[in-house]
Amino acid sequence: IEAALSWLREAQELCGELPLADAAGTHLSLCALLSQLGRHSDAEHHAAEAVRLGEEDIMQLHTLQPTPGVDKDGTAVLREKASVLAVAYNNLAVQREFLGQAMECLALYEKAVIIAEGHMDVSNPLIARLRESHRNAVQTHRRIAVVAALPPVRHPPA
């Protein structure tokens, strides 16, 4: 894992020269690897950078350029960029959840789902995975809220 991390750090140095989507992908890979290592604060930083780059990438789409032989109106390009951004939001939510930022992570999970549903093909399995991540986070948050609302247990003196 350390060797992969070293290679990704080298790739990160080249991010300024890469297309934004590729740079975002590099940051997503760094996020995933650092998360596996339990370095969630560092992973969160890379997820946030992937979100920033993904948003910038989409904002630079003045007009959709068709991909020859793939689509006529450029929607494939937008779908690809939207999927990168949706994954980035999801990964940012995961890291914020690890860092104990429950309310913020719920909004980020929801944003990932909204982006995916709005721009991706309905049959794309990524949408189902993002919905499941959001649903699981909501259920976890509800359980935590219920436990927090319970009165403290009092034990009789011994």
Image (cartoon, rainbow, N blue to C red):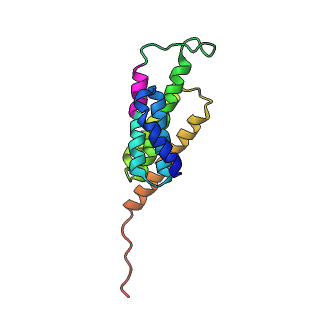
Tell me, yes or no, if residue 110 can be seen here. no
Q: Which residue is located at x 53 percent, y 39 percent?
A: 130
Nearest to the observer: residue 149 or residue 118: 118
Q: Residue furthest bottom?
A: 158
Q: Is residue 126 above or below residue 151?
A: above
Q: Quadrant of the C terminus?
A: bottom left
Q: Is residue 154 above or below residue 108?
A: below
Provide the residue span drawn in magenta. Answer: 52-60
Residue 62: x %, y % from top left = 41, 14
**Relative horizontal placement of residue 87, taking residue 153 as reference (left or right):** right
Q: Which residue is located at x 38 percent, y 83 percent?
A: 156
Main SS of the magenta segment? helix
Residue 59 found in image quarter: top left
Nearest to the observer: residue 20 or residue 133: 20
Residue 76: x %, y % from top left = 56, 20
**Relative horizontal placement of residue 119, taking residue 62 as reference (left or right):** right
Residue 97: x %, y % from top left = 42, 50
